[in-house]
Image (cartoon, coloured by chain):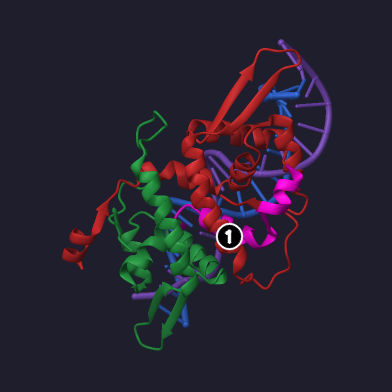
Chain colours: A green, B red, C purple, D blue
Amino acid sequence: MQKECEEKCTETCLCSLEGIITAVGKKWALLVINTLGHYQKLRYNEIMHELHNISPKTLSDLLKRLEKENLVRREVFNEIPPRVQYSLTEDGKELRGAVIRLLRWASKRHNPRKEKCVDQYKRVSLHKIKDE
Amino acid sequence: MQKECEEKCTETCLCSLEGIITAVGKKWALLVINTLGHYQKLRYNEIMHELHNISPKTLSDLLKRLEKENLVRREVFNEIPPRVQYSLTEDGKELRGAVIRLLRWASKRHNPRKEKCVDQYKRVSLHKIKDE
DNA sequence: CAGTATCCCAGCGGATACTG
DNA sequence: CAGTATCCGCTGGGATACTG
């Protein structure tokens, strides 16, 4: 096993993964990433509207986090009223590729939990995943 | 946009994704999935050893959750002392495929956060990702 | 419009001790 | 060996009100 691993495995510092793991793990992260990729550019309130029942603080925190991870770009226009555009960075788009495969795979299999659908995401209007 | 989506997009109930999203988001989930896939079969204490500083409760909770999501299989052998084997289900293996791509992608790019590596996972002995 | 500021709470994750 | 039981602190996420 040890030898096999040395031949076949790729050494990877897990530290570098931690950011992605926790970012992707956030409750709305995958949805925001998918939504941003879908529409290319969205303003703060547009995202709010897409993810119907997310709270402003939650979204704000998440966007900051994703920005820090270099997955989301934030552009401020000096206008009144203020305008802010959010979009995916190149990294974000790449991540979205992997994410979409995950989402597709997840949506294809039947729900293994015998519970009814929770309505956590029920009011989210974007029920679609755009093809790559 | 609406029309384009109707042509190109795939309708997806997000309910079915929720389980995966939250499961994958759990702190040790990706690591457990990767580790199980790596070694094929592992006993409870072996996983404990691999993920050096996970607490028994945390691991226990996680394994139950992954089992409920039909990602991990649990086999009990009626022996004394007891023996329990954990392994990935077919779904788990498929998920691992997507996960590995995610991990590889994450490990390739430089860490965008300028912070030092946190030592959250520092003591994890499995720093390797087995090729598929 | 694009967020803060506050307050609040459930539950995740951890430490430790114990058990069939 | 493979977990429970118990306790606990932290923070992610939500509701609501407010602001430059």
Residue at 53 percent across and 46 percent down: it is: B96
> Quick one: which residue is furthest to the left in this view?
B3
Residue A84 in sight from this viewpoint = yes
Quarter of the picture containing the C terminus of chain A is: bottom left
The residue under label 1 is B104
Queried whether the magenta region covers residue B11, the answer comes back as no
Query: What is the total number of numbered labels drawn onto the structure image?
Result: 1
Residue at 62 percent across and 19 percent down: it is: B76
Dot 1: few (<14), some (14–19), or many (≥20) neighbours within 10 Å? some
Residue B87's image quarter? top right
Horizontal and vertical percent position of residue B42: 67, 32
Horizontal and vertical percent position of residue B66: 54, 36
For this rendering, which residue is in front, B29 or A42?
B29
User: Tag 1: residue type?
Assistant: Arg
Residue at 43 percent across and 68 percent down: it is: A93
Chain letter of mark 1 equals: B
Q: Is residue B23 above or below residue A49?
A: above
Q: Is residue A90 above or below residue A34?
A: below
For this rendering, which residue is in front, C9 or A106?
A106
Q: Main secondary structure of the magenta part?
A: helix
Q: Is residue A50 left or right of residue A33?
A: left
Q: Is residue A78 above or below residue B48?
A: below
Horizontal and vertical percent position of residue D6: 71, 26
Identify the magenta region.
Answer: A1-29
Residue C2's image quarter? bottom left
Queried whether the magenta region covers residue A7, the answer comes back as yes
Residue B128 in sight from this viewpoint = no
SS of the residue at dot 1? Answer: helix
Horizontal and vertical percent position of residue D10: 68, 52
